[in-house]
Amino acid sequence: MTPSDNSAAAPHADMAMAGIVHIGIGAFHRAHQAVYTDVAMQAKGGNWRIIGVSLRSTDIVDALNAQDCAFTVIERHPDGPRARRITSLSKAIAASRDVAPVLDALADPAIRIVTITVTEKAYGIDRVSGTVQAEHPAVKHDLAYPATPTGLLGILVAGLKRRKQAGIRPFTIVSCDNLPSNGVLLRNGVIDFAKRSDPDLAGWIKENASFPSTMVDRITPAATATTLSDAKRLTGIDDPAAIETEPFSQWVIEDDFPDGRPAWEEAGAILVHDVEPYELMKLRMLNGSHSLIAYLGQVGDYRYVRDAMANEAFSQLVAQHMENAAATMAPLAGIDFSNYGAELVARFRNPEIAHETRQIAMDGTEKLPQRIFAPACDLPQESKQIGTFALCFAAWMAVMRQRVNTAPDAAAELLNDPRADEIIDALAVYQDAADIYENLSKLPGWMPRQLQDSSFWREAVIERLSILLSSGADAAITYEINE
Ligand code: CS2
């Protein structure tokens, strides 16, 4: 996508003022939106630097502020790494220390856009009804203490309230998380949250605020000691905030920015009228396959995605799953799903990218609904293609059981899922595959009714779970590709 060499950003970009607040300044943001904005400002200027907000972590905030918020992005190309310094970030704030400067930034009329990467679990919005999850810890706190919010919805609504009181238009709110129709979901959640304390504010948001949906894509493993030493070698600069990522990058954005936006198209962003088909394609083909690789990889001791893809049978299974996922989607003009799938396979195989299956396996209860359940529901009833979806769900169950058994005392931490306690309860007594299926698939509000009512789905999952429990991941893969 972007010209990516070892040069520094053009100086004028460093002088620009902030126009964006970004919530969630983890590795993904630094590899994605921060790069697009950097390139856009170098090409077309504009006061679009980013004030980065971290909801929880303080280390990254301190590391960035100590170096004027410039940081290194390493792209792992097949012919070797390339580094560039990104200067689109102007300052970083830790909301967990003090939310006041975050709200001040949100109330500043110079801020016209808020972008968000906080991961699925931080939203606190019911995916079906679009209303807030009143028991979500941050939502619960912020509804009770709206002046000192700690979570996404509370902070957005407090910022919008300040703007309304000051007679300033709302900022445009852009979710960049892997959720279907992320703009619509967030709009519903923000309006519902506001309605609970201030119906006028809710009406004003509904009337005036825009929530474009987006599809974001760039595989970004967690940074390691190698990332940091490579960054130093390539740039000469010590940078604890350096990150590494793949060369590929994609951003499809619904073009609905009433108060302007950076020229992100200069960095390759695609501005469209309707993002949903792109989101479905990416969630189902890329993220769904990722989850399949992650859970089977965890059962079968494949540490990295590339290790799974180096195994012939595993890679064949992944290709099969992509084909099955493609079969759930309406045609998309200009996109050939089999080419898209072949590109994904090549990206997953990239030997330069050390993407841990453990990292992708986290938060399964948040990820499986859009990656696995929704497409499984869109297949013809009792279709053979359901097999790879059933296998992914079975592998998730096998991983949960394996982790609970390995360390019963540390299971909550090991499971790495916001519903860990419920999962532990569901797996409390010794169970066979059928019991495990019954207990885990019944977590409230999770698996859709259509799958709950399908004995075909139930049998398919239990059969695969039995193989995984008795004979392991490779046996289940062999079974699936010969089905
Ligand atoms: C991955 C994603 O961790 C995960 O769940 O599937 O982070 C994936 O790497 C990105 O969506 C790629 O754009």
Image: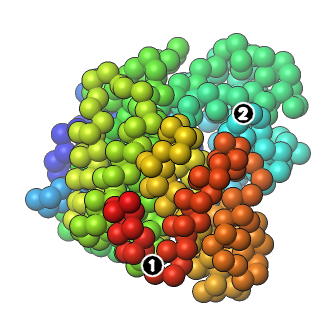
Residue 480 at x, y = what percent? 39, 62
- Circle 2 sits in a helix, a strand or a loop, which is it? loop
Q: Amino acid at mark 2?
A: Gly
| 1 over 5 or under it: above or below | above
Query: Would you say the residues marked 1 and 2 are in contact, meaning their CB atoms lie under 8 Å apart?
Result: no
The Cα–Cα distance between marks 1 and 2, rounded to whole angstroms, is 39 Å
Numbered label attached to residue 177: none
Q: Amino acid at mark 1?
A: Gly
In front of the other: 159 or 336: 336
- Picture quadrant of residue 43: top left
Task: Please report whichever mark, 1 or 2, sits nearer to the chain's N-terminal start.
Answer: 2
| 192 over 432 or under it: above or below | above
In front of the other: 268 or 9: 268
Q: Residue at x 50, y 17 (%)?
A: 256
Badge 1 density bin: few <14, some 14–19, many ≥20, Cα 10 Å: some
- Circle 1 sits in a helix, a strand or a loop, which is it? loop
Q: Which residue has dot 1 on it?
A: 472
Badge 2 density bin: few <14, some 14–19, many ≥20, Cα 10 Å: some
Q: Which residue has dot 2 on it?
A: 130
- Picture quadrant of residue 469: bottom right
